Amino acid sequence: MNQFSKEYLVVAQNASGRNMHVPLYRFSGHRPGPKVYIQSSIHGAEVQGNVVIYHLVQWLKQHSICGEVMLVPNCNPVGTNIKSGEYTLGRFDPVNGTNWNRGYLYDEDLVTSFAQTVLAEESVASIKQRFRAQIKKRLQQALDAPWGIGLAQQLNLKLQQLAFDADIVIDIHNGPVSTRHIYIPKYASAAATQFNIPHVIFIPNKFAGALDEATFCPWWSLAEYLKTNKGREIELGVEAFTLEMGSQEVINFTEGEYDARSILSYLNSKGCLADADVGAENIARYAVDLHHYKTLFTHQGGIVEYLAKPGEHVKQGQALARVLNVDALDTPDATETITAPCDLIPILHFPSASVLSGTQLYKCFTHYQQLT
Amino acid sequence: MNQFSKEYLVVAQNASGRNMHVPLYRFSGHRPGPKVYIQSSIHGAEVQGNVVIYHLVQWLKQHSICGEVMLVPNCNPVGTNIKSGEYTLGRFDPVNGTNWNRGYLYDEDLVTSFAQTVLAEESVASIKQRFRAQIKKRLQQALDAPWGIGLAQQLNLKLQQLAFDADIVIDIHNGPVSTRHIYIPKYASAAATQFNIPHVIFIPNKFAGALDEATFCPWWSLAEYLKTNKGREIELGVEAFTLEMGSQEVINFTEGEYDARSILSYLNSKGCLADADVGAENIARYAVDLHHYKTLFTHQGGIVEYLAKPGEHVKQGQALARVLNVDALDTPDATETITAPCDLIPILHFPSASVLSGTQLYKCFTHYQQLT
Amino acid sequence: MNQFSKEYLVVAQNASGRNMHVPLYRFSGHRPGPKVYIQSSIHGAEVQGNVVIYHLVQWLKQHSICGEVMLVPNCNPVGTNIKSGEYTLGRFDPVNGTNWNRGYLYDEDLVTSFAQTVLAEESVASIKQRFRAQIKKRLQQALDAPWGIGLAQQLNLKLQQLAFDADIVIDIHNGPVSTRHIYIPKYASAAATQFNIPHVIFIPNKFAGALDEATFCPWWSLAEYLKTNKGREIELGVEAFTLEMGSQEVINFTEGEYDARSILSYLNSKGCLADADVGAENIARYAVDLHHYKTLFTHQGGIVEYLAKPGEHVKQGQALARVLNVDALDTPDATETITAPCDLIPILHFPSASVLSGTQLYKCFTHYQQLT
Amino acid sequence: MNQFSKEYLVVAQNASGRNMHVPLYRFSGHRPGPKVYIQSSIHGAEVQGNVVIYHLVQWLKQHSICGEVMLVPNCNPVGTNIKSGEYTLGRFDPVNGTNWNRGYLYDEDLVTSFAQTVLAEESVASIKQRFRAQIKKRLQQALDAPWGIGLAQQLNLKLQQLAFDADIVIDIHNGPVSTRHIYIPKYASAAATQFNIPHVIFIPNKFAGALDEATFCPWWSLAEYLKTNKGREIELGVEAFTLEMGSQEVINFTEGEYDARSILSYLNSKGCLADADVGAENIARYAVDLHHYKTLFTHQGGIVEYLAKPGEHVKQGQALARVLNVDALDTPDATETITAPCDLIPILHFPSASVLSGTQLYKCFTHYQQLT
């Protein structure tokens, strides 16, 4: 079977002066294969990924793999433990509002200057190895900045150091109240039908701070540069994804087993599993390009019933939500209906009935198409 | 039809120095009858009651009543508007942790000294009128305290001033993730079968700070005193209830209509409605005495799947919840099952999967019996 | 010199499923003497006590004591680590608002039933030993409650188990913006001139949930009972105090050294130190009975300048604070002055300029007198 | 004297469905002159600016001006009213962490396309008038986005609509614990000696979301474009500043009067005041370019005494702070000293003694120079 080890990495220190660490589970197969990195709960309230990793660990204890799989559940020991009321305030650093998922590093200049050092005859293996070394050196420099570095970035970079070693990176999240969906870089669109996830967002080569982008942007840009400037088309073989495994603040072991098989199916298609019989399911899948994934904001405050459920197909003009105005119960303005501006699939909605104006009420697929 | 008026009462001032007010809807029938006071959302995240009041207002606009109905939706303008993350931090004053529902006033000594003034020949109407005047004077004194008074208490007392005029007081709440249930003072146990609420908690004559208690304790104690010390048994005709209308952070208009009819059914049984044909439904109802309504606390921290749903009948030893220990995914301690200590009905559970040790995981009916 | 040991006690588990522990420093002298328990930071933002304990530890490493001193700095590992914005949300459990300093246990019935078992000839040493055993058994029962126990109470009881072994208990706190003051049980009023703390509050034998009360109430009640019912006057030799060492959210090493000497001076007067030359300073000390320690609440919201500084002597009618009303800058109502209702010493004030109505603006000594 | 009006602008709706508005005080002189816009408290805990505006209003009621002055105190009715513990959680939207001061709009493409429409003979007045109209149209488009817009951006854009009419924009903030300092766009460096503010940061033409940048970047870029591409050097006469008026969470009326005169001094130098005798004070002023204004992050968690006070001149190697490690009180690691990496002036420090690793401990002037 596989070799297994568990270790703990220090990623921060709390106000008691105590180390905060993340667990790293590592399985190595006896046959060569891709290196895989999977983490969950960088946003502290998004906990289903931990159950997914639980099921992956159970599977990996009993089935041989090719290459290596690293799993880091509960990868944010700070965000996991900030309660405010009964819920977990896990999306941003409570001190300064910094999103825990926006501090990964991507240095475009480094990619360009590295690309210029690639010789015509250099093997892909050598390019990859040298590139990884350069990026990881850059990450270490950022961590060693003489005046220091912010908490969220510190945490992000320590995880990125692990992840950048991998060929496949999977970052498991949850939406607020959400159906399952996945972010896939456009160049890896073939992966869309390997995961059992019904909603797919194709994203461009643009860095906005998240781990998937911090992983694929360098490789994507490097490949583009080599193609454009050196006329060399190479397959660097790195893919990275953000998986949104349903709603935050809940876990479900049964669904987690299905979610784990969804990931195993993809890994199998990439040659990570040895003789496993795990394939994609035959489900309907819908996809949009990122700019068609739209946020509907409220223009009013009030109390909301969410009429359209995540995953439903909603026609233009159909009711999405009904807002109660508590000061006008005796008038026709007592309730207001918010309707769909166009045909759409609501993917997620705000998790509280109480909203101010300017609240992200729904995020929706528009101009979506079915994948085949 | 009924007479209708709407007004706004100032209950606090915010940090901008602006008044914060609550809406008061008042319907008066042309025939005499009991005075009813209904409020909702003293805990800011418990919003379904506002929908119930919405439906009550629609009904009251079209049907005649006997007596008067006062409705105060969204009765806590502070707690309704404290967001912390996406949820509403509505249970306590964020400055000092004071529960918004524990600052009502009950002065046992006042009851005793008043009781001593009741003459043998005094009519019930006179007793009630004098008693109300005394209590309301006492409330005003508390509000006028020369060194001032805390915010939560200020809010509570201003609402209590309205409520203490009423013969029937209904305070609508929600549990975290909860089935519908109701708190009924033991002496008014007949009301249990008038509401369409499947779970009933009978409470004793003991003040713990809430509005229902602040309403019935004085009358109950007064009646007891007159009985014990003056040998006079009188029916003062005041009842007060806390209704828990499902889960916090969500509203549902369809369920709200059912909830409104549940209240109308009770009011009809009390003679508040004129010629209305609203009666209690034939549903199963289960009841416990307060000391059999028990809280199950976690002894461990971790991530929890709530296996037992509110309202289910669970046998001793049956699984209630499954806790994931993210540091032990490779060991048999990866998950732990929490089982029912006895036969029980879970009424509500904690609304987040992430718990520390000492969390109120479930509140349960034990030693319950079916009402007939 | 003294014997020294350090250990860690588990007091809770966090949402990552990890143990949270408190450090316990223990110094034992070679000569017999009282047992002393000192803790700090049960309220997480009140951190100066940790510096005081730091200085005490340095002293105890170099000077012999009689008896034993236990020190538990940072005794609340949960509350210390809840940030909300830049400040520490350390006063109450962020899940439910429970004050971290109100869950200690005092069982009056247990005291009474124990007192009845005291025989006329029983030695004080035996009474103390048996009483301690009973109380600690009771604490353990509470911790072992079959349905569990809340987080704050869990933490409190584990600390109380340590503290109840001691003859002298010192619980170090801070006020919001505050001058140094101390709570002293009336029967131990002689201690007032042993500490170098200028403001003293004498408290009655009444339990309100704090550690000092949970320590002295049982002994005090026991002594009273024996006196009243058995005609036996005994000196049980237990004293407990809450020390408020200035303002929360700041530490100061220089002041901490002075604070440490203040405690050493008291301990010396109790025979805890061997041949130490530490005595009380000759400072002005003012004292009140608890009911003369009054809270001034705002009746308006707005932005406040605190004109009277903690520790100043203020005359009736003198300005305490000036409130800005941002909506009325062009009118005479732009500012409002809050004046002293009587002669007073402000001991602490609210730490933020922004207040709602019903805010605890100042806590003040009234009808105070100078100790001599 | 001046003409005066007061109005209220709706900028949001809260969860009660009620409008939230900001007060706008407007003074118009009888003589022509620049248009001035001054706001305060976009970060809710930074309240001293309201006192400054209070004093400005008192002055403007008694002295004639040339042109117009608009004042918007307490410009963030949401952020002002979020309490979390005793402090105000005013820096970011508590729902999603969005900084209230980063949602102003700057559209570089619009500047370029507008610049191309400027004719050689067009007057500066005409250019300014047309440019303002274009930008304000763009702001309105953003506010009218068919899918809506986030709360912070909504608030920011409504304020920006007012501000973009002005020639002079002053946005008053506070640091955490801070000495007074000011951000000045490089091209307006002459203003540095008109304000009575001892610490000056010169900033480049780079947009990072704040109001001062959103004001000056368009004009600066327009001027640059015209110079570079059309060979036309024009003085557009617009200046914008962020003033940091000391520490958050406190107000001081006496200091506010000095702060108000500081602004009046600058306005007088710009011809806004009619015959006023208000000039700059002769104080030492130190300045840095933005990239020399550096943040020192902690690499450890613990409890901190801030030894270096804001405004002090600190030599390389000198102690800035001392960190207590509560788990190591018996060892030499009990405290750690953080020293200055180079000669510097600490301008502000973190406002809480309790820090995690990665906390912004100090922000410092390095390579500063004295202005003359």
Image (tube, coloured by chain):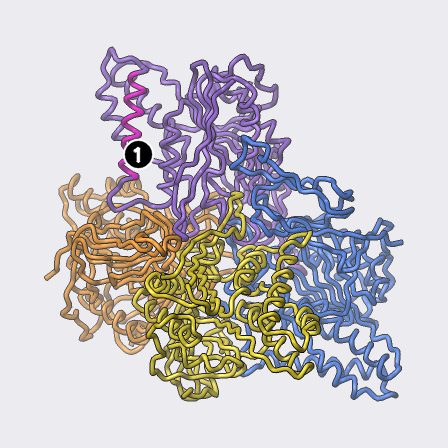
Chain colours: A yellow, B orange, C purple, D blue
Outermost residue, left side: B372
- On the question of residue B125 being in view, the answer is no
Which element is circle 1 on? helix
In the visual, does B331 lie left or right of A205?
left
| Quarter of image, res B62 | bottom left
- Secondary structure, magenta segment, majority class: helix
Q: Name the residue under label 1.
A: C139
Q: Quadrant of the C terminus of chain B?
A: bottom left
Looking at the image, can residue D342 be seen?
yes
Q: Indicate the position of residue C178 as horizontal and vertical percent values.
A: 57, 37
In the rendered image of this protein, does residue A342 appear above or below residue D177? below
In the picture shown, does residue B181 fall above or below D361? Answer: below
Does B371 sit left or right of C91 as displayed? Answer: left
A313 or C7, nearer to the observer: C7
- Residue C2 appears at what percent x and percent y? 49, 20
Count all numbered tags in the image, as a single digit. 1
* Residue C138 lies in the magenta-colored region: yes
Q: Give the range drawn in magenta.
A: C126-143
Q: Which chain carries label 1?
A: C
Bin the neighbour count of mark 1 within 10 Å (Cα to Cα): few under 14, some 14-19, many 20 and up: many
Q: Taking B195 as reference, is D326 left or right?
A: right
Is D316 situated above or below A94? above
| Picture residue at 16% right of the left edge, 62% below the top | B285
Q: Horizontal placement of D203 versus C129: left or right? A: right
- Where residue A151 sits in the image (x, y, percent)? 57, 55
Foreground residue among C2 and D208 = C2
Residue A272 among magenta residues: no
Q: Which amino acid, by three-letter code, is at mark 1? A: Leu
Can you say which quadrant of the picture contains the N terminus of chain B? bottom left
